[in-house]
Amino acid sequence: MAVAALFSVSASQAQVTEVVEIAEVPVSKYSVQTNSFWDNWFISLNAGAQFSYLYPEGSQEFKDRITFSGLAYVGKWFTPGMGMRLAYNGYQFQGYEDKLDYMNLHVDALMNVTNMIMGYNPDRLYSMIPYVGMGAVRVFDHNSYAFGFNAGILNTFRLNDSWKVNLEMGALFADKSMDGVTGPKRAFDDIFSVTAGITYTIGGDTWNNSPDISSLVMMNAAEIAALNEALAQEQSNNRNLRNQLAQKPKEIVKEKVISGDCMTAPQSIFFDLNSATLASDKDLVNLKAIATMAKQDNVKLHIIGYADSATGDAKYNQSLSMKRAQTIADQLVKLGVNKANLTVEGKGGVATLDPASYNRRVIIEAM
């Protein structure tokens, strides 16, 4: 967790007091944490039509083989891309000779390919969810059972965090004797269905964004460098105070204060909206620490500017990101860093972090 600390020194005693302010943690825009067992359960009710495919077709025309189809299921999403459901569908299907009452109880694996490919977005309107599964089919008229393989595509349309409208196209492939007829050219009895309905997610979609580890590392490195610089300064002041109190004018204390080692991780400086100026004095402290290390080890620095793509067009954001990077470069030169050791680049508008304010930054990398 990123922290900012202020230090104060008492002249009567060498004491450092730390005041900690908690900062907002940056998170990845599309990455989420795995939920608990009780989160993201859903139930659904659908209704529609189905037709049986029989080979040879027998005496029934296509329209005579269309019957009502009902579908109900309960399930859970384990991740935004992977889930499972227990489904019940059936009523009647047109067999080779007669309409037969049946039920199909099956377990399906769900794959939200929209979230898998494009990343999780809680406000996304449409998701395409292919599924495959297996279960048991019972035909009540024959009092018989058969193994069934199920496959299809579930399409969902978001209304809010809890409610979705869905349109499902599915297929059931069962043993060829399901309808009581076993013709030599028939491999399966097949039933195809199209249903529509409503899905309710219990408690609503509850996915928490994952912390952006790389950004946290960069923020922490910058904060630690600033703290080291401030602490070193306070330690130096404390020693000077002790020398003055001891009243030893002939004694000269010489000590070199080292603020830190050469940078081993990228450093981040953040900016306000539509601004290319430093946001606070803390940023200047960070830059002083970076400048000290760069001069001490003659390090070459690569300065990369960014803007957030949520505001401004691409051309404007490219210009703003370059101005931000140049601001940091100019400030480092003022602090004594050799200009020849600096390279500057603007990356334009990005949307890699959430909230958008964390995309308004400059990253300083050691080359």
Image (cartoon, helix red, strand yellow):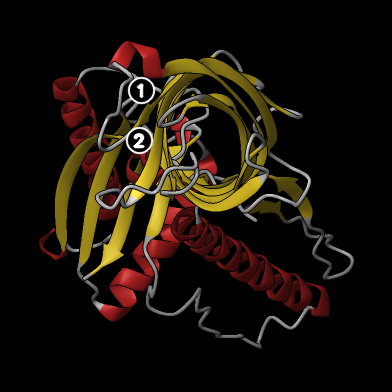
Label 1 is placed on what type of residue?
Ala
280 vs 57, left or right, is right
Q: Position of residue 67 (x, y in %)?
A: 48, 16
144 vs 115, left or right, is right
The quadrant the N terminus occupies is bottom right
C-beta proximity under 8 Å, tags 2 and 1: yes
Label 2 is placed on what type of residue?
Ala
Where 142 sits versus 132, above or below? above
Residue drawn at point x = 58 percent, y = 19 percent: 46
Gap between marks 2 and 1, in whole Å? 7 Å
SS type, badge 2: loop
SS type, badge 1: loop
Q: Give residue 137's mark.
A: none
Where 8 sits versus 91, above or below? below
Q: Position of residue 223 (x, y in %)?
A: 55, 58
Dot 2 alpha-carbon crowd within 10 angstroms: few under 14, some 14 to 19, many 20 or more: some
Residue drawn at point x = 84 percent, y = 60 percent: 10
Is residue 157 at all visible to an observer of this figure? no
The quadrant the C terminus occupies is bottom left
Q: Earlier in the sequence, mark 2 or mark 1?
A: 1
Q: Give residue 310's mark.
A: 1
Where 328 sits versus 239, above or below? above
Residue 364 falls in image quadrant: bottom left
Mark 2 sits on what residue?
Answer: 351
Q: Which one is in front, 38 or 329?
A: 38
Where 46 sits versus 109, above or below? above
Residue drawn at point x = 48 percent, y = 19 percent: 195
Residue 251 falls in image quadrant: bottom right
Q: Which one is in front, 149 or 264?
A: 149
Residue drawn at point x = 30 percent, y = 48 percent: 186
